[in-house]
Amino acid sequence: MSERLRGVVLAHADLATALVEAARAIAGDETGLAPVSNAGCDRAGLAHRLEAAVRGGPALVFTDLAGGSCTNVAATVARGRADLRVVTGVNLAMLLEFAFHRDEALDAAAERAAAAGRAAVREVSR
């Protein structure tokens, strides 16, 4: 792959910024991740923010809630575009997996990140 993937964390309020800062604290500044918040904007404004962050792709968009406004906007923006994929249920594990494998093809990176995110969710308090 000639161009490294970009990652955009699209989430409610300050969650995107917090997740990206945490990923950078662990993996360094070259994570390829950019935060985008839905704070203070409507769907059209959020779509514009996402388009600006993606800058033409290829990019993997991580959203917080399946069925939430961020995911719905991301899915609309990505519809019909071969250079964008959306993964919902973002967590730190999937962002770190993305940061360390940005040279993969977009589909492979999306699958890898989603698998890492699923594997990180477990109950440990028993």
Image (spheres, rainbow, N blue to C red):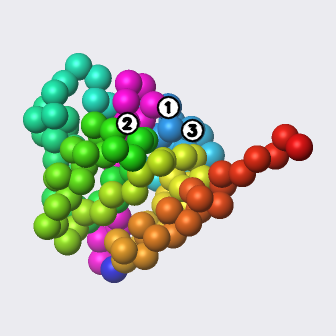
Label 2 amino acid?
A: Ala
Please identify the quadrant where the N terminus is shown: bottom left
Element type at marker 3?
Answer: helix
Please identify the quadrant where the C terminus is shown: top right
Residue range highlighted in magenta: 2-16
How far apart marks 2 and 3 lie (CA) works out to: 15 Å
Residue 93: x and y, percent?
60, 53
Element type at marker 1?
Answer: helix
Q: Is residue 35 magenta?
A: no
How far apart marks 1 and 2 lie (CA) works out to: 10 Å
- Residue farthest along the right direction in this orientation: 126
Instruction: Name the residue tied to disc 3.
Output: 22
From the viewer's perspective, is residue 24 above or below residue 117? above
Residue 18 is marked as: 1
- Residue farthest along the bottom direction in this orientation: 1
- The residue positioned 42% from the left and 35% from the top of the image is 16
Label 1 amino acid?
A: Ala
Residue 109: x and y, percent?
43, 70
Residue 86: x and y, percent?
33, 57
Q: Are marks 1 and 3 in contact (CB under 8 Å)?
A: yes
Identify the image quadrant of residue 23: top right
